[in-house]
Amino acid sequence: MPTLVPLSRSLSAFEGTSHGTVPGYLAAQMAGAILASLALRSLFGDVAHLGATLPGLGITSFKAMVVELVLTLRLVSFILGTASGARNIGTNAAIAIGGYIALAGLWAAPITGASMNPARSLGPVLLSGDWAWWVYVLGPIAGGLIAVAIAWVLRGPPAKAASLAAQGDIPDYTTGK
């Protein structure tokens, strides 16, 4: 999933997921990215910057950060609009979200690499020595948080039932428990 870090933060802020679980998700994602980069380095050496997403030729770091912010804002908006709470449209949500990721990758890959995920970018950057890391951390996190803010303004805070469902505590209405 291209945007696990912003998504976990965004869903936590919007759907009422326990904030205590977010640091564990973030740590697991970062550790996985670093371990994957270590595995790639041990197998192949520092080939192609270990798959690090870097700004394209002639693209400044600031411009790349803005593009990553917009990409992630749109992605999290798609996710919150199709796969959260009462707006869950089931398996069609995967088609909409996957379609957005594919289209975003097509137009933004030459500009920024279309990362949309700080964990995916941070692991290779830390180990390859390319230090445009802040582009791929600040942009997606800011984009995810802005998407949540927009959703709050447009829809209001989540309902108690949505918060319970996000935590896996769906009440059984047939028994009243």
Image (tube, rainbow, N blue to C red):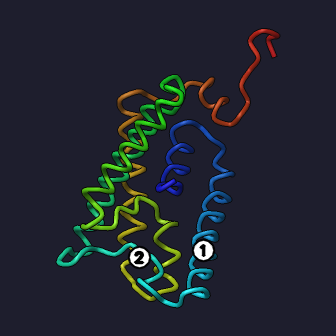
Observer-nearest residue: 36 or 17? 36
> Tag 2's secondary structure?
helix
Residue at 52% across, 66% down: 119
Which residue is tagged 2? 133
Residue at 38% across, 56% down: 142
Residue 36's disc is 1
**Disc 2 vs disc 1: Cβ atoms closer than 8 Å?**
no
> Tag 1's secondary structure?
helix
Residue 124's disc is none
Image location of residue 104, percent across then percent down: 31, 52
Q: What's under tag 1, amino acid-wise?
A: Ala
Left or right, residue 81 beside residue 123: left
Q: Quadrant of the C terminus?
A: top right
Of labels 2 and 1, the one closer to you? 1
Image location of residue 111, percent across then percent down: 24, 67
Q: What's under tag 2, amino acid-wise?
A: Trp
Left or right, residue 23 beside residue 150: right
Observer-nearest residue: 58 or 62? 58
Task: Write down the quadrant of residue 81 in the picture.
Answer: top left
Relative height, residue 150 to residue 72 (above, below): above
Left or right, residue 84 beside residue 104: right
- First-in-chain label (2 vs 1): 1
Q: From this viewpoint, which residue is outermost toward the top?
A: 174
Observer-nearest residue: 146 or 53? 53
Image location of residue 131, percent across then percent down: 39, 83
Number of labels in the image equals: 2
Image location of residue 29, percent across then percent down: 60, 63
- Badge 1: residue crowd in 10 Å (few <14, some 14–19, many ≥20): some
